[in-house]
């Protein structure tokens, strides 16, 4: 007798190739049109699904998990970060959580370097001038930025993405420094040419550029708070392609407005898509709409990992990318 197929509910539209493969393997409910589910819709989806496929826009807390009932057995997150899911509460209720690590490492690292260059070389200002038809021709003193070769880059979080950023930055001639929860092995430091700082305060005060590449956890919330931001040199810039909650956005905005920092490049924000309006007005800030991992290849590979996690679970085995509270 054939084993009944799992009911899989997907909360957002995914690449067509991923959705097609899901339809072949599971009883899948796809999201059409593509819009963020309301909390009530998300709760209802969790009650009728064997497997839920959410993404970063879906906040799945303990109260929502309490409404899930007995059917839901796996939350196969479409994305590497799981700070929007209460993994501990899910585990207590016998619900497994998986994610998609590793597949967007290079894409995010590329965007980090793009932001560093955009902020230090005034690329958005030049683009705006050209698009507005205001360019009057070349001038020796126009649009002067700064050379990144020789500058000190301080990487906060030296996991897969942090190391990928280090390799790219080294190719631009930057000096690589880092702070991490756990120091890398000596041979890893040698390959990356990276200097470890046990004290985040000391590293922050000496860097020309800070790159945020750590996940959002209770211990990293506002890790770059008002006090630490004030430690940065007034000529320094900060770039964030990780999670917005790591930086105190209001304090950052105040520092930029006061000239205490030279600039910022942000792909993520503390309150999701609700960006501080004062931050939007600053000429020394480059803002992007959370597009660090947005490549066709990366999105497809994320979907492939989701499918593998669900298929492995359906076959009675532990999902290869299962997340447990001790990993966070």
Image: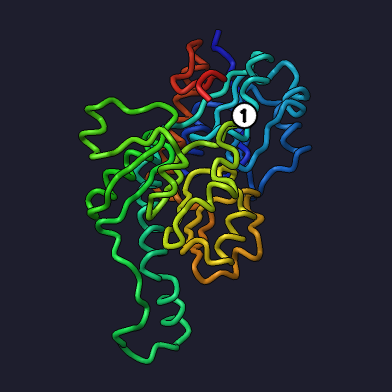
Label 1 sits on residue = 52
Residue at the extreme bottom of the image, as rendered:
136
Image quarter where the N terminus lies is top right
Label 1 environment density (alpha carbons within 10 Å; few <14, some 14–19, many ≥20): many
Residue 234: horizontal and vertical position, in percent? 46, 61
Instruction: Name the residue rendered at 51%, 59% in the picture.
Output: 288
Q: On the rendered structure, is 261 left or right of 149?
A: right
Q: Position of residue 11 (x, y in %)?
A: 63, 39
- The residue depicted at 59 percent of the width and 66 percent of the height is 280
Q: Does residue 111 appear in this view?
A: no
Residue 19 position within the rendered picture, expressed as x and y whole percent measured from the top left: 51, 39
| Residue 99 visible in the displayed image | yes
Q: Quadrant of residue 133?
A: bottom left
Q: Is residue 266 above or below residue 10?
A: below
Q: Position of residue 137 (x, y in %)?
A: 33, 90
Give 145 or 39, whichever is nearer the viewer. Answer: 145
Tag 1's secondary structure? strand
Q: Nearer the viewer, residue 142 or 308?
A: 142
Q: Residue at x 50, y 26 (%)?
A: 25
At 64% from the left and 65% from the top, the residue drawn is 278
Viewed as shown, does residue 41 lie left or right of 7? Answer: right
Q: How is the image coloured?
A: rainbow
Q: In terms of depth relative to the viewer, which is nearer, 310 or 224? A: 224
Tell me: residue 300, above or below residue 198.
below
Total of numbered circles in the picture?
Answer: 1
């Amino acid at each position: 007798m054939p084993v009944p197929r799992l009911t899989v509910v997907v909360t957002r539209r995914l690449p067509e190739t991923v959705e097609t493969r899901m339809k072949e393997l599971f009883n899948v409910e796809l999201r059409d049109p593509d819009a963020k589910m309301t909390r009530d819709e998300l709760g209802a989806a969790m009650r009728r699904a064997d497997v839920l496929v959410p993404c970063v826009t879906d906040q799945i807390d303990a109260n929502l998990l309490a409404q899930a009932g007995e059917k839901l057995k796996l939350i196969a997150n479409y994305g590497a970060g799981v700070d929007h899911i209460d993994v501990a509460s899910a585990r207590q209720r016998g619900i497994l959580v998986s994610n998609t690590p590793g597949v967007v490492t290079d894409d995010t690292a590329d965007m980090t370097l793009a932001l560093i260059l955009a902020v230090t070389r005034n690329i958005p200002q030049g683009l705006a001038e050209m698009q507005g038809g205001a360019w009057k021709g070349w001038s020796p003193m126009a649009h002067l930025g700064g050379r990144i070769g020789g500058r000190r880059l301080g990487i906060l979080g030296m996991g897969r993405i942090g190391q990928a950023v280090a390799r790219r930055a080294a190719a631009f001639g930057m000096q690589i420094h880092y702070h991490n929860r756990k120091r890398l092995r000596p041979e890893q430091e040698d390959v990356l040419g990276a200097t470890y700082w046990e004290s985040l305060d000391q590293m922050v005060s000496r860097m020309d550029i800070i790159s945020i590449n750590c996940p959002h956890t209770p211990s990293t919330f506002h890790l770059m708070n008002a006090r630490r931001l004030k430690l940065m040199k007034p000529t320094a810039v900060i770039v964030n392609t990780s999670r917005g909650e790591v930086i105190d956005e209001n304090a950052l905005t105040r520092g930029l407005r006061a000239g205490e920092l030279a600039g910022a490049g942000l792909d993520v924000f503390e309150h999701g898509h609700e960006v501080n309006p004062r931050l939007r007005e600053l000429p020394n800030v480059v803002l992007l709409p959370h597009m660090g991992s947005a490549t066709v290849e990366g999105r497809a590979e994320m979907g492939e990992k989701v499918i593998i996690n669900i298929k492995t679970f359906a076959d009675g085995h532990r999902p290869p990318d299962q997340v447990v509270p001790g990993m966070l």
